[in-house]
Amino acid sequence: AGVGASGGGSGGGGDSSTSEPTVRDLRQYIANDLQMSDSAELLELLVANKILDMNLKLRVVQQVLWKNHLVEHSTSSFASSILSGQSGHSLFASGSGLSMVFSSGGGGSGSSAASRNITSDTPVTALPPMVVTYRLAGVDGEATEDHVDEGSLADPEAPSEMQSAEAREKLMEKEYGITRFITEGRGIFVLLRSIESNILDTLRRIRRDNVSLRFKKKAAAAAGNEISSSSLTLRNPSQVNFLTSPPCSGLILLRHCANLAHNRKKLLEARAPTVLLRLLLDVLNSLEENNGETSGGTKSSGSENSTNPTANVLKELIEALASDISSDSDGTMTKSARTFASQESFESDAEQESGTLPLLLSSLRTTFLSPPLRKVIAKLLPYLTYGQVTLSRELALDIHKHVIVDDLKDGEDSDESSSSSSPSGSSVLMDTFVQAAINLPPCEVCNTLRMELINCGFVDRIAMFALKHIPSQPPPWSPALWSKDQALEKSKNSTKHQELADAWRVYFARSGVRTAYRMLTGLVMGHGPTQSMLANVGGSDSSDGDNSKNGCPIQFLTACHWIESTSDNSTFKINLNGIGILAETLLDELKEDNAAVAKQIGTIRRKTRARKKEIAEERRSKALVSMSAFGTLAGARKLEETQTRTDTSASSDTAVASSGGVRDVAASMLAPVFGLFGAQSSAAAAAATNASASSRSIETDQAKRNEKQQGEAQSTSEKPSWMAEMEAMEDETGLTCSVCQEGRTLQPTELLGLYAYIKKVSIPHNHCGGRTQVDGTRMLLSLPSNLPDSLLGTDLDEEYFSFAKEAANALRNSSYAAASLASIAQSRRPSHFVTTVTAGNAIHCSCHATARTADRNHPKAPKSEWEGASLRNSRVACNAIMPLVSSRSSKVPLMAVEIALTDYQTIISNMLGARPKSMLWSVLHDMRLLLLRMAYGEALNTDCAGGSLSSNAMLLFHEMFMADMFARDAEHDSPETAKHARSLSGGLVAAYEILEAEDFDRAGSSAAASMLRGLSDAAPMAALCCILFHNEKDDSNADSGNPASSSSPSPQRRWVLQKEKFLCALIICAGRRHALGVEDSGCMTPRGGAKARVRSSSFSEWDMVEDGNDAPENSVSGTGSSPTKRNPPSILGKRGLPQIDEYASALRPMITLYAILDQLSAGFVVEMADEKIEDSVSQLVKTVEACQRCKTIHELLQKANIGLDQERIVEELQKGLMLSD
């Protein structure tokens, strides 16, 4: 691109030789010209008054953004007045920064180009030079210009997803068609050998320099010299060069070749995926070993490896080839690979490739792999056998050896084990093989591996593990699975019934069962022999275990059918944990293209359907009998009578009896309607029967009459079934919809939401409103590179500081930290947040949509969406529905959740005027402001004319559930954001300990002052994140990573262990807010040009006492009404410290906030039922009201259970008072 060639093509710091110049390269070029090469991140670049993302290509910026800007301003005198006659690049002042003009190198510069009108058809070479404005980020506060992200500009030269495959291939052929000549003949083999030789030679040099470094350190230690800090951080020069250097030329050429489908097919024929994957594992393994040595034996998380250009290109190639292999359903590519390798001219190469699979598996055992890359390798691994029996058998034996069925895990357990920081080699291989079995596609190459897995007994072992400990009888709460003669005792209190239910509960709770069913589903997909083998696993269908085969009392197909046909049962506390849908999917795959197995499965399913119909008929009959107002229907009794009749009755008697029976049935059916004739009809029928059956004995008639009387007495004493069903129906608990009055119990598949009122608030930076300050970015980036000597090796180093530094490093490499690093001057520009309140009324999202349509289409009084919603919200104003997403909404369809969250995010975006970069931080800031409003005692019903402290405390819990969901989502989409939030509390603890350390130099240190300022601003958010992310974990045990209990907080949670440090940080925050004149949460609604102070009566009592005192102007006691900045008092000795009563109003909000957080920590867990939420909300409201009723600061400290010495409190407050700038 012309702009890149003249602007940033020769600048350092970018991979300009392997890819197009980007905005980051241009920024580095400008920084080099300004002699600030090490501080390039302080600059931000603008084109057309829009801030550019650093990853944008300069060519795309010129072709799209700059051209559109010129088209919109083609009639202005901009080009002729500024750009006329300029070439190359020049500088001129523009707005708040300097602008640089970059020529595209074509004929577009000059007055002729400037004076010509520019249209969308104007070629790029005819455009005027592009004007790029650069400035220091954050000097004037938060930027107001729009941001242009990497994905917001479409590359006009890149293939579009909307184009057809032929059009995209034609476009790629036009650009990379010349690479076809390289793949002809032995070109691929030569290129691969060149790449392999180059990379292995580089890794050999890295290992050589590692040996040299180790000898130097040993020599220094033998001489008795202490290793200096510089020698500890000494890096391997070969590795440093490898990390920053572009990939070798052969690898770049191979990447260009891989852009064509024809060339990728050639690469697969040459078995390039095996070679490339082995090289990638060798690179990652070498860098990990070196990182472990230079960092004192601690294994890095792979952040350096992820930025290595060579590793990135290898990953890109492997993913592209894996995608092609996955789409090769008929196996044509792998067939050609076998044919290609079997040619005589390439036998030596094929023999060499056959030995790469064992090397690859050994590299997998010792290499740290990120979860996404591990999934790619797992999908690619079966194809690396290329359908060869020898390689397939070798891989099958390795799978059989390393997959230990008793160690299989499900869901989050498997994710946590696979993403652990230091997994063992066996666990890495096992996770990889498990993922490979789950994602095994139906193709010829994988079918060879499936046959070898059958031969080695792996499939049978997985099937027997799935059947292990399964009960030999169906679930007792599913009567359709029981035949009529095998029906279990109906009493739910029976011992046998309960024991069988307990056995099924244990089976469903077994670890690894879900993973086993998923593996079997992948193994049987499209493979007849595996399907037939599984169909014969296990014993017969009989319930006893005597006729069992293969050590299992029931047949595998029968067991899967039992599981797919049952469901959760609240009476017995049964939760299938998703096994039912997995069993159904497995049965569907088993009968795919296999007539014999399909017939067996169809027979089992038809038997159950027939039994369901039979049970339905019985229940219908029973319901009709029970609903009769005059006793049991005669038809039911007639059936019993006909069974007791003797065979000696004459045919005529039988006919008359039959006719009498018909009349009996008709009379009984009409009895509820025509009650007067019921007795007469019955009597007439009885007389006819007696007349025709005169030969019957008197004893038989007497027995019938007794039986009839007993039946009538029993029918009158029994309760109708419909009434019993209504009495057994569960009552709705928790939140209910304001329209249908049903909640999660009766409508578990409908998503509930809270009517809420959201408003935008703007808080200046000099009033503790800086976004990068309150979210802890400034504090994390201010942490020193190493702990003081007194703290090295402590729990602080292992559990808090290391994770905080990882988060800081991730932030430092992101564009989000640029504004924080450049905040060198105070700004008057405010930061924008949203704050939410609610009246506590819930509604189903589907009910709201229906009501909205009805309101708009009302013929007489149509209403807008939120006018009608206000009526349903108890006439409280609302403008949003906050979805109640948590573990209890797991039965809600995913599409409904996505739509509700999208609508919620759209409302927030419209409110802020821009889309939030992170919904996680938007919700966290919302919760922080709500907590501050409670702590300051502000009225929460002023915004929407409704709501209470109780309803908004409930909102706080549901927002925490939503934040937890966004955090889990961010772990995949934006790992640095999730790591930032989860490490914030540990960073605060580490920062406070560092500042308190005796050997930490804080006198006159700007870093110490910056750290203390960041700690004070981030204290509320860090305390909130501590409770949100660490309330269920045992922080006293470093090896314990799992929550102690999912139903209650851990007794040794982080808040309990570190609450004193959080209290001190909040006190420092109170001092800083007092020094800056901050007297409320920042969410007060302006009235009459100023912010009105609306507090509870108890809060105003303290203010009235202070307002009555005639304090001098330089006194810091009391809280005046003016929001001007106060001059902080000087630090005095302990004997000269002011009394705590002088700072009562300054301390009160943060002490109240501490009490709220302490009570919140006592009850919050991620999985909470509505009843438990109500109890926690009640306790939280009691805590807030108790704090508001306190008359003095001493009473408040006692109520908040604070045992900190008052002199210590004043000392911490003084630290914050000094942070007035």
Image: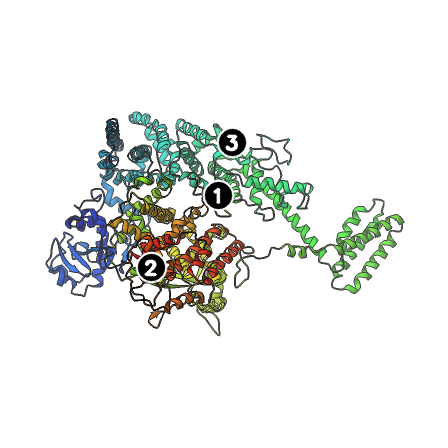
Give the structural element (helix, strand or loop) at label 2.
helix
Tell me the quarter of the picture where residue 359 sits: top left
Question: Relative to 678, is 1022 above or below?
Answer: above
Residue ranking furthest to the left: 85
Residue ranking furthest to the front: 1135
Instruction: Give x and y (percent) for residue 92.
Output: 14, 58
The span from disc 2 to disc 3 (Cα, nearest Å) is 68 Å
Q: Nearer the viewer, residue 1186 or 355?
A: 1186
What residue lies at 67% left-to-right and 57% top-to-bottom? 723
Instruction: Give x and y (percent) for residue 116.
Output: 15, 62
Give the structural element (helix, strand or loop) at label 1.
loop
Instruction: Give x and y (percent) for residue 488.
Output: 67, 42
The residue mark sitting in front, 2 or 3, is 2
Residue ranking furthest to the bottom: 860
The kind of residue on which mark 3 rests is Asp
Give the structural element (helix, strand or loop) at label 3.
helix
The residue pinned by badge 3 equals 460
The kind of residue on which mark 1 rests is Ala
Give the class, few, some or many, for how many residues have Cα within 10 Å of label 2's Cα (few <14, many ≥20). many
- Left/right of residue 11 with respect to residue 879 in the rendered view: left
Q: Is residue 440 visible?
A: no
The kind of residue on which mark 2 rests is Arg
